[in-house]
Image (cartoon, rainbow, N blue to C red):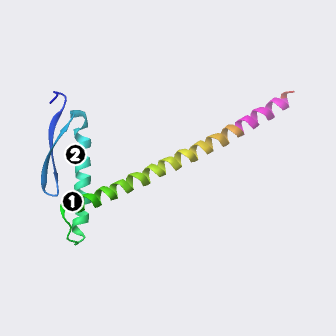
Amino acid sequence: MHSDVRSVTVTILGKEYQISCPPAEEEALRKSARYLDDQMSKIRARGTTLGFEKIAIMAALNISHELLKKSQQVNDSENGSARELRHLEEKIDLALRTHRQLEI
């Protein structure tokens, strides 16, 4: 094991897991584990008797869906910003052309 990687213990649905992680990523790993634990706990609390593996798969699917949805929102936002930027550039170009015509 490299000296720049250490073992971090996280708890998910009451089970402890040792994960190798660079020190700079430890807080992000802990937040991710808490988020996963929360998602899995919500699925288990729904009352359906599911095994650990099925709960994990359902949580993974839910998290993947959230990620794809947010990614699409970012893409839509970037596309909207690019359109607005092009519109502003066109207005500036028009204003500059109009100003040049007035000078002539």
**Point 25% across, 64% down: residue:** 42
Distance from the alpha carbon under mark 1 to that under mark 2: 21 Å
Residue 23 in the image, given as x and y percentages of width and height: 21, 33
Q: What residue span does the magenta drawing correspond to?
A: 91-102
Residue 49 in the image, given as x and y percentages of width and height: 20, 71
Instruction: Name the side, left or right, on which 26 lies relative to 89.
Output: left
Query: Which residue is at the front of the view, 83 or 55?
Result: 55
**Point 23% across, 62% down: residue:** 54
Residue, disc 2: 30
Element at badge 2? helix
| Residue 15, numbered circle | none
Residue 99 in the magenta stretch? The answer is: yes
The kind of residue tagged 1 is: Glu
Residue, disc 1: 53
Residue 95 in the image, given as x and y percentages of width and height: 75, 36
Q: Are there few (<14), some (14-19), or many (20+) residues within 10 Å of tag 2?
A: some
Residue 46 in the magenta stretch? The answer is: no
Query: Which residue is at the front of the view, 54 or 9?
Result: 54
Relative to residue 36, is residue 85 depicted above or below?
A: above
Q: Earlier in the sequence, mark 1 or mark 2?
A: 2
Dividing the picture into quadrants, the one containing residue 85 is top right
Q: Are there few (<14), some (14-19), or many (20+) residues within 10 Å of tag 1?
A: few
Q: How many marks?
A: 2
Residue 91 in the image, given as x and y percentages of width and height: 71, 40
Do the numbered discs 1 and 2 sit on residues whose CB atoms are within 8 Å? Answer: no
Main structural element of the magenta stretch: helix, strand or loop? helix
Relative to residue 65, is residue 86 depicted above or below?
A: above
Element at badge 1? helix
The kind of residue tagged 2 is: Arg
Instruction: Name the side, left or right, on which 81 lies relative to 20.
Output: right
